[in-house]
């Protein structure tokens, strides 16, 4: 399904898009659609289903809450335990409880990083400078 939208854009922006169209040998419509897709709010549908509801809820958070998530850090203890279990897994066989713990830590780590990334993407889309998060 597609929708038709009539939109007036500044001449300078139109020229940039037209130049990009010619340079990439794509239609102007394709260039505009690509620009809209890149610049649209981030989607959470490309992540595993078990994380989608959590990520979808981030869209409704205020900026301060998103900054807290985007700048959060794992504790040193959490990181050390995860690394210990990963190293042990490479060298020996983990017990059932260690394997379960590692699986839970991995899932928690994936969720943590996806939330951080999604929060940063939403902040960027809301026109915040997120470059300070890179450090």
Image (cartoon, grey):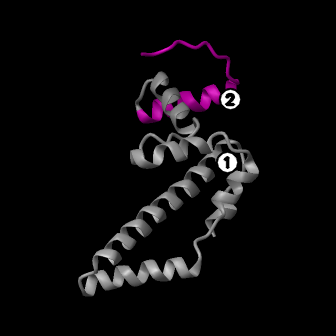
Considering depth in this image, is 21 or 121 the residue closer to the camera? 121
Residue 109 in percent (x, y) is at: 47, 65
- Residue 76 position in % (x across, y down): 57, 81
User: Residue beneath label 1, please?
Assistant: 123
Local packing at callout 1 (Cα closer than 10 Å; few below 14, some 14-19, many 20+) is many
Are there few (<14), some (14-19), or many (20+) residues within 10 Å of tag 2?
Answer: few
Residue in the image at 43% along x and 35% along y: 24
122 is higher (above) or lower (below) than 20: below
Which of the two discs, 2 and 1, sits closer to the camera? 1
The part of the chain drawn in magenta is: 1-24
Q: Quarter of the image containing the C terminus?
A: bottom right
In this view of the protein, which residue sits in the foreground, 9 or 58? 58
The residue carrying mark 2 is: 12
Split into 4 quadrants, where in the image is the N terminus?
A: top left
Helix, strand or loop under label 2: helix
Confirm or deny contact between disc 2 and disc 1 (CB under 8 A). no
Residue 117, quarter of picture:
bottom right
Q: Residue at x 61, y 12 (%)?
A: 6
**Could you tell me which residue is drawn at 55 percent across and 54 percent down?**
115
Instruction: From this view, report whether residue 47 is shown above or below residue 18.
Output: below
Does the magenta run of residues contain 10?
A: yes
Q: Position of residue 25 (x, y in %)?
A: 40, 30
Is 10 placed left or right of 26 in the picture?
right
């Amino acid at each position: 399904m597609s929708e038709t939208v009539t939109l007036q854009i500044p001449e300078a922006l139109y020229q940039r898009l037209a130049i990009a169209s010619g340079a990439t040998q794509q239609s102007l419509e394709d260039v505009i659609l690509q620009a809209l897709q890149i610049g649209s709010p981030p989607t959470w549908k490309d992540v595993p289903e078990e994380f989608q509801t959590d990520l979808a809820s981030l869209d409704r958070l205020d900026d301060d809450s998103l900054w807290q998530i985007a700048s959060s850090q794992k504790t040193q203890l959490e990181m050390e335990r995860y690394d210990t279990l990963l190293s042990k897994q490479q060298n020996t066989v983990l017990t059932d409880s260690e394997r379960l713990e590692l699986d839970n830590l991995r899932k928690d780590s994936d969720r943590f990083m996806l939330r951080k990334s999604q929060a940063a993407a939403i902040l960027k889309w809301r026109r915040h400078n997120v470059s300070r998060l890179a450090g």
